[in-house]
Image: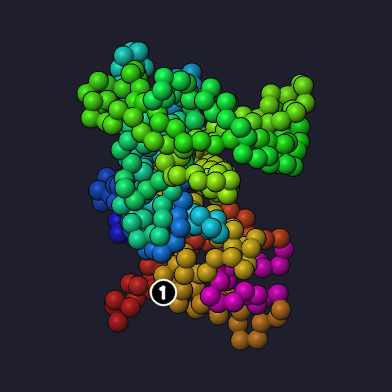
Amino acid sequence: MPRALVCDPGSCVRKLGSGRRSREMRFTRFTRHAAVTPEAIFADAGAKTGLRAAGREVLAIQDSSDLVFGGVKRRAQGFGPVGKGGCTRGLTLHAVLAVDAITGEVLGLAGAQVWNRTGGKAAPRAQRTLEEKESLRWIKGAETAGRVLAKAAGITVVADRESDIYEDYARKPANVHLVTRMRHNRCLGDGKKLYDHMAAQNPAGELEHIDIPAKPGQSARQAKLALRFCKVEVRAPHSGMPKESVQLLAPSLTLWAIDICEVNAPEEITPIHWRLISTRAIEDWAGALEILRLYRMRWSIEEYFHSLKSGGFKIEEARIGEPDPMMVLTAAAAVAAVTVMQLIKARDNPLGQAIAAVFDKQDCKIIAAINQEYEGPNPRPRQKNPNPRHSLAYATWVIGRLGGWTGYYDKPGPKTLNSGLQNFYKMKRGAILMRRDM
Ligand SMILES: [Mn+2]
């Protein structure tokens, strides 16, 4: 049973998400007894992702998300503060999602961490050490990517502004490049400031008709953007890091910076201004565009967190009363949510990923057998799986049916697929047990 949870984490998720007290008690007791840990679940997922990443150009997109479970009651149960304001309680998940850098296919979780901020409301000084400690997640994430995805042709770790940390660039593994959105106007080797230096460059070119999505108080529009890039020598910061760790780091680093700002923005609008920083050399215009393209693929992880919090998972609604088993459930859901995301992508693009990108040989055999069961000997057109057997869309059709989708109306959504996946894992466990018996 613990092995089943580690290998097929979908098998426990949905039922708990829907919240029955007795089931939750059983799950709590089970995790305590089985000593299954988030680390084991993430390590297993990472190993599988590593196999899929072999030979590919891979992005490891990392980001954190707070899972909010409640207020006062959750505090009493031992959940630490999350979100702004300090009134809400929950857990924090930091995920490293591996994506094919060329096709955008989701390959799986390279790794993840889940933690409970148990220090309560911390004093400013303790808060700082906590932040320092938490900022290590970016460095750890890059290390995990370098280790787990070692067989990839290339690895680029992509992250948002929070990860603009000098230590991150200085301590990155040799087989990994970093692309990050800038947060700090750093000092350069010649005493200038990074932002001024970039603004003083001539634009390398312009990007026209760039679609800018709507945001509150601002409708969608098309923008014209000027792009500048340059090689920079950034100095280690004097503050914000403990002295001991600064002394261990290189006093300066060569990085590449990209500055993208909107030209002729309408007056009532705050013009777009994006700044990226990369450890990968940018030689020319095409190289700069490539870094920009990679950074824009970061949205996959936003999509991923969204599916974990809504759709089939609603992880924030699980009612487990103790932090430790809740961390196990979060880890299991974090892995299963990637699979559901892959199934949905295959549903919308049947010519996309192959079934082998998600399921192993044994899984594929079971899926084919279930498919046969659903189709029957003489299937009418609507009862027939329209997808080729090697495609992931084929599996989506079967998993959808297992989740209660009739095959007739609409398409299976995340909820149905999650429930189908859970049923699939149960059937698989049954099939394995039976074979062992014979
Ligand atoms: Mn973030």
Q: Is residue 134 left or right of residue 268?
A: left
- The residue nearer to you, when weighing 56 against 192, is 192
Q: Position of residue 26 (x, y in %)?
A: 35, 47
- The residue nearer to you, when weighing 275 against 382, is 275
Q: Position of residue 101 (x, y in %)?
A: 51, 55
- The residue nearer to you, when weighing 340 against 105, is 105
Above or below, 132 relative to 204: above
Residue 247 shown in magenta: no
- Which residue extends farthest bottom? 377
Q: Which residue is mark 1?
A: 361
Q: Position of residue 408 (x, y in %)?
A: 71, 67
Above or below, 230 relative to 387: above
Q: Residue at x 23, y 30 (%)?
A: 248
Q: Is residue 215 left or right of residue 135?
A: right
Q: Quadrant of the N terminus?
A: bottom left
Q: Is residue 382 left or right of residue 403?
A: right
Q: Residue at x 65, y 40 (%)?
A: 205
Q: Residue 9 sits in which quadrant?
A: bottom left
Q: Residue at x 73, y 24 (%)?
A: 269
Q: Residue at x 32, y 35 (%)?
A: 170
Amino acid carrying mark 1 in the image = Lys
Q: Is residue 360 visible?
A: yes
Q: Is residue 303 visible?
A: no
Q: Does any atom of ligand 1 lie closer than 8 Å to the CB of label 1? A: no
Residue 403 shown in magenta: yes
Q: Position of residue 271 (x, y in %)?
A: 68, 26
Q: Is residue 372 left or right of residue 192?
A: right
In the image, the segment drawn in magenta is: 382-409
Above or below, 280 relative to 91: below
Q: Secondary structure at mark 1?
A: helix
